[in-house]
Amino acid sequence: MGADRERRGRRRPVHAGVYACCGVVLMTGCASMPDNGGLRDVESSQRPEAQVRVFAMPPRENAQPEEIVQGFLEALTSDDQGFETARKYLTEEASAKWRPNQSTTVLADGPNTVAEHSNSREATGDYAYALTGARVARVDSQFAYEPAAGRYDESVHLTESRKKDGTKQWRIDALPQGLVMGLSDFQRNYESVNKYYFASNAEDGPDGQLGAVADPVYVREQVDPMTQMVTSLLKGPTSWLKPVVRSSFPTGTALKKNAELAPDEQNRLTVPLNAKADRVGQYVCTEMAAQILFTLQDLTPTGIDEVEIQRSDGTQSCVLTDKRAEIYVAHGPAKRAEYEYFIDGEKRLVRIPAAGSEQDPEPVPGALGKGDKALRSAAVSRDEDTAAGVSLDGRSLFVGSLASGGSLGEAVVRSKATSEDDGLSTPSWDASGGLWVADRDPKDSRLLLLAKGAEEPTAVKTPVGLEGRIEAVRVAADGVRIALIVREGDSTTLLIGRIERQDGPGGRETVAIHELRSVAPRLEEVTAMSWAGDSRLVVVGREAGGVQQIRYVQVDGSTPVGSAPSALTGVKEIAASEDERLPLVAHSEDGIVRLSSGEQWQTVVKTGMAPVYPG
């Protein structure tokens, strides 16, 4: 990538989504399908190599009903920009009513098809086919992904339509809105990309930077993804994220008609906008350009170095380089972590350098590194100036400076739990210096927030109907999303919530968590998790009847592209940085271990627990 690219963090593999294509695959709808019952699969095509485009074939002359259905379903997985080929399988009336972009339903396999029996089909020319399958996910009209379950059961109806020359042909005249396809075809056709907006309910970063918040969406990677992404960005954030972010683009801003975006040979991109953005000032225009730069950074092998925004008359509104954008906007963690931290065998907080091969831990400066207070877990503020530690019995939370000579005062939070298993969770720091912790006392379980890590703890409101007890808390670097492990009975679930803040009585801020959603629904037991990027977490858990595994998940519940971390047995805790260049750190049966890119797990120390990065 080059040193000048390193600051971007981990880059996802670039798929076909980009400009050249080295091959074309033609799909034909000629597989036979019985019209007298019997379920069969519409085979999901194998995922082709990168830079292969897939086009469907139109219906052939005198195609029979079963061939029409088969060809239509296959055409839904092609790279036609406006599904022109798929529409050729529909009557004119059905094509006019069909809205393919309304949603995409993803099934475990390609949709099964079965002919619906009718005693009068031959006489009436009436054919219908049921489409069934097991739901995996749904992508809505905003391109937002959401895991789904249950049975998919829809149908298509066919009729004989008369062509201009008087001959008849079979065409679909009734069908469900949106698209339906198997998981392998979805993975070939779509890629996950982050749009970026600004946090509206969190304080600016330490240098007055705006906080960028990732909003992942799925776009068709072979159909001009750059133009798709900017169009989606201009339309605004997805519904779930909208209450806590803002966009600098004025309402109604859009690309000029027929604009197609592509960078030049110097990685510079020109973005022509309509008249809605003509009157913005330089500061707002700079924010707009930053949103575009961050959104498009992973859609080419080298990213975008410069964005020029043009007014509707073609004149320049502003220009922003990627280096200048990072001055204005905090993208991910405000600064790269200097250290990894954990509790050593003497129950004190220690650290090792986050980058490099040095593995000899040293006690942190200040009281938490002296060992006077035996600790079982800790959290370090994002500026690495302050730390919070939970006492060995889980009943007390202390906050101390990470400076030589720093003292430790009284506990800032005390739990009345009688069992160590029911005490305080590992704490977590947000971007503005707030300290979060869950009190797991069965008689008074609650989520607490200490503003600036020092003020009186306040109870955070959680959604009505939240079942179970919060076991673990991690706040994202953007300050507007929170990850929780919640226990209900014998199961533990990973949930993502939205942090909303409002001014309360007497000027005291109230904080609430809204719209919790499961992002690892297939895992029956989640034992550890950590943020591992702008919209990604690393999770330790197991499926029903399965063994423990480590995997990455997206905040929308999808599985990111790329391989999972190397297997590791007996993992009790795991830590990752939002800066994806830094290694994973875990507490396993082998002690404290860490995993750098391209390597195997390496033991740091045999005795230790509770590894954390700042945050």
Image (spheres, rainbow, N blue to C red):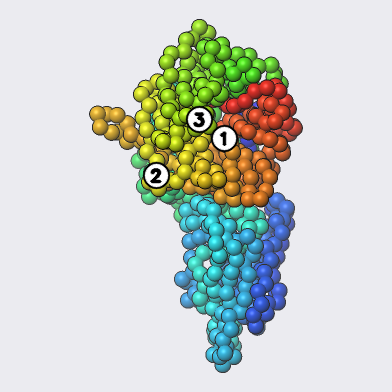
**Residue 167 rendering spot, x and y as whole percentages:** 59, 88
Question: Which is more N-terminal, label 3 or label 2?
Answer: 3
Q: SS for tag 2? A: loop
Label 2 close to label 3 by CB (< 8 Å): no
Question: Which is more N-terminal, label 3 or label 1?
Answer: 3
**Residue 20 rendering spot, x and y as whole percentages:** 67, 50
Residues packed near mark 1 inside 10 Å, few (<14), some (14 to 19) or many (20 plus): many
Amino acid type, residue under disc 3 in the picture: Ser
Q: Which residue is mark 3?
A: 419
Q: Is residue 510 left or right of residue 529?
A: left
Q: SS for tag 1? A: strand
Amino acid type, residue under disc 1 in the picture: Ser
Residues packed near mark 3 inside 10 Å, few (<14), some (14 to 19) or many (20 plus): few
Question: From this viewpoint, which residue is outermost toward the left?
Answer: 506
Amino acid type, residue under disc 2 in the picture: Pro
Q: Is residue 430 left or right of residue 180?
A: left
Of residue 506 and residue 16, the one placed in the foreground of this image is 506
Q: Which residue is mark 1?
A: 530
Label 1 close to label 3 by CB (< 8 Å): no
Q: Which residue is mark 2?
A: 463
Can the viewer see residue 2? no
- Residue 285 lies, with reference to residue 191, above or below; the image says above
